[in-house]
Amino acid sequence: MPRQRLYLDTSVFGGYFDEEFANHTKPLFERVNDGEFIILFSTLTQEELAPAPSYIQELVIALRTEWVEFLSVSEEAIDLANAYIAEKVVGKTSYADCLHIALSTIHHADFLVSWNFKHIVNMQRIRGYNSINIKNGYKELEIRSPREFEYYENEE
């Protein structure tokens, strides 16, 4: 069975060094570094992490390239992100969050992983994103926090 494909949003990289989130984020990165998952890494995430401290940049650089798939923002992703906003799943100020979700959806991520509970890992919003996904011919997207991967076994 192929490796599960995880889209990690920007908050997960910061969570590695955050006292509140590190206990759940570091084990996920250990599993990533052990080759258990394929990481979907977008140009959007890269842009958002550009001003981050060097220790976060080093975490990104440490990802093994054979387990990373690089994604670019496309018109298709922009259109889907705009659909989330047009349908009022979130407001216009959450456009970047919508773009992360759209990229995950279009590129068939098995999971989008985030620490953003306000705009992403939020049951009401997940239902909204997925209703738009289905309406536009995409599959539902599993959205989870790193905490949930403590109990998730990737069956290869």
Image (cartoon, grey):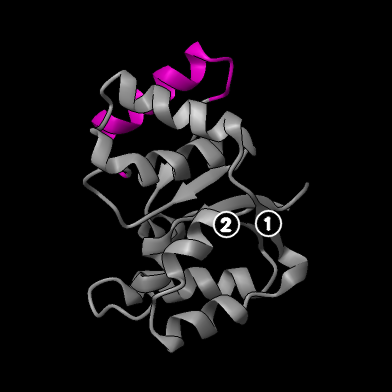
Which badge, 2 or 1, comes first in the chain's sequence? 2
Question: Magenta includes 138?
Answer: yes
Q: Is residue 5 above or below residue 84?
A: below
At a point 23% along the width and 33% down the height, the residue shown is 91
As drawn, the label of residue 83 is none
**In this image, 154 relative to 145: left or right?**
right
**In this image, 67 relative to 146: left or right?**
right
Whether tag 2 and tag 1 are in contact, CB under 8 A, the answer is yes
Q: Secondary structure at mark 2?
A: helix
Q: Label 2 belongs to which residue?
A: 43
Question: Magenta includes 104?
Answer: no
At a point 46% along the width and 45% down the height, the residue shown is 100
Q: Is residue 119 above or below residue 68?
A: above
- Residue range in magenta is 121-139
Q: Label 1 belongs to which residue?
A: 70
Q: Is residue 37 above or below residue 142?
A: below
* One can see residue 142 in this view: no
At a point 60% along the width and 68% down the height, the residue shown is 32
Mark whose residue sits in front, 2 or 1 = 2
At a point 28% along the width and 26% down the height, the residue shown is 89
Q: Nearer the viewer, residue 65 or 57?
A: 57
**Amino acid type, residue under disc 1 in the picture:** Phe
Q: Nearer the viewer, residue 26 or 18?
A: 18
Q: Secondary structure at mark 1?
A: strand
Tally the marks.
2
